[in-house]
Image (tube, rainbow, N blue to C red):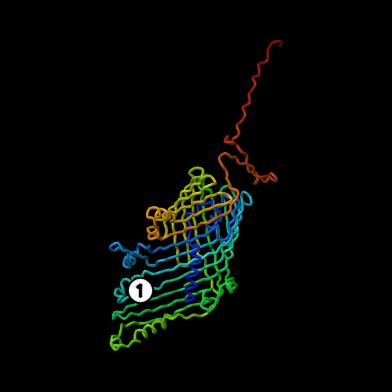
Amino acid sequence: MRKIQFLLILCAGFIGTATFAQTESTLYFMNSLPQVMDVNPAIMPRYKLSIGLPGISSVAGVYSNNGFTYNDITSKSNGVVVGDLSKLSENLPEKNYIAVGAQVDVFRFGMRINPKMYLMFSSSLKGYSRSMLPKGLSSLLVDGTGPLVGSYINTAPQQEGLSYLETGIGMAYQASDKFTFGGRLKYLKGIANVTTESSSLVVQVADTYLITATAGANIKTSGIDNFNKSGYNVGDHWGDYTNNTGWGLDLGATYKFMDKLTLGASLIDIGFINWKNNTVQYTLDPSVATYTFGGVDMTQLLNKNSDYLSDQWDQAKEKFKMNEVPTGSYTTMLPSKFYLSGNYELMESLSIGALFFSEQFRDRYSAGMTAAVNKNFGKILTTSLSYTVSNRSYNNIGVGLSVNASPVQLYIVGDNLLRAPVSLIANQNLNSYVNSSQLLTVRAGLNLVFGWDKGKTKTQAVKDDSHNPKLNNSKATVKPTYGRSTQKKKKKTKQLKVAPKSKVGR
């Protein structure tokens, strides 16, 4: 029971504070935010100096469900909402993944060292949980064992979860006028982990209607079994949670393909954590964890044997009791993400963008696409409006909003976020929004920012001899032209007509 309580506390602590593992697509186009480097470390934020304070600079949450919404499991009967398992079973894919994640920044600092280099340092608490529910489980609940006569079905769920502290240092460098690359090295401290190496729960119905259930499982955990100990307190044993270490890497690049078209790509969270603290393995042996139910012996019930049903239940529980043994260290990979983008500048401060993104976590690969319109209203307001297709979900309208009143920057950005206020205004509640959502990402916070980078404008001519080896101590200079053409006009020289020599006096 204490383990269950700890898992609930762990999920509530990270999910409630609002990774990610899941991808954030609208954030990719918000380059006024220092947090944009979380999705591509090659994108330099517009502010030359940014500071993120603990707990308020960035709080993010992600929810994703590829299987169903609330509307898929309910129906209305005479104006009353009732559960509808048959409707749910019809709409489910074979494997249904429900994923939630959270991130809270502990500290963040970024600074543009020179026009070509940007350095950043950050520390964040991250958490991720993913559950897999097979369609067979709902089919068994809805249809019973009748359709399984002479066959079998696998109904085993799977669970993955991890939480850790990430501390990283990164850099973005503009190698040329067209190409910029960036990277971030991250040191990881694992807090807790649950990973399902394998699981099976096969229900087989013979032609004689005997029902046999056979289970197998191999689940590894770290930092969880301690909570089964009486009087255990995390604060008194915090040192136990510093033994799990790992490394992560983010890589990114942008390339100005044409004058107004910029392409980008990034790989995020390439890494691992080695779990050593309080590692416990839970197993089920299929040769032992098997039970056959041949029906109820009516004679026992007629004889008023009150212990008959409880004895049957105790026998089944004993068969499926997990073996719990301490184990050695083990390694898990981070949920890695890939982004591929294109951004086209329609006019100054207005652009459109497209983004392909994907995520891989163990055997699960998911992908999606986003289209966005991005508008800057000077340096005061940065906005983005997006549309995302992901995880069989097609009604995701995202928004990004950043109010830049230096030194304070307030922002909120997310996918499938705009329908929330629309639902609230139209219906005075969020029911229609919540009941039809399969995807939600949201990130909000307050940054301290200084020194808006205006970038090169059309009214500036740039003379850069810094790469000319013939010149010593050459530095790039910018000369204002005040709207005049940057090309020097050739001065016209008047040619004097020479009069012919006089023949007089020859």
Asked whether 209 or 151 is in front, the reply is 209
Give the vertical position of 138 relative to 366 (above or below).
Answer: below
Q: Quadrant of the C terminus?
A: top right
Give the vertical position of 143 relative to 60 (above or below).
Answer: below
Hey, which residue is sitting farthest top in the picture? 505
Hey, which residue is sitting farthest front in the picture? 428
Per the image, label 1 sits on a secondary structure element best described as strand
> Residue 398, position in %: x, y?
44, 54
Give the image quarter of residue 215.
bottom left
> Residue 194, position in %: x, y?
49, 72
> Residue 232, position in %: x, y?
55, 76
Q: Residue at x 51, y 80 (%)?
A: 325
Q: Bin the neighbour count of mark 1 within 10 Å (Cα to Cα): few under 14, some 14-19, many 20 and up.
A: many
Residue tagged by mark 1? 153
Hey, which residue is sitting farthest right in the picture? 505
Q: Can residue 10 be seen here?
A: yes
What's under tag 1, amino acid-wise? Ile
Asked whether 348 or 413 is in front, the reply is 413
Number of labelled discs?
1
Give the vertical position of 270 relative to 344 (above or below).
Answer: below
Quick check: 130 left or right of 144? Answer: right
Give the vertical position of 364 relative to 408 (above or below).
Answer: below
> Residue 38, position in %: x, y?
54, 58
Q: Can residue 393 be seen here?
A: no
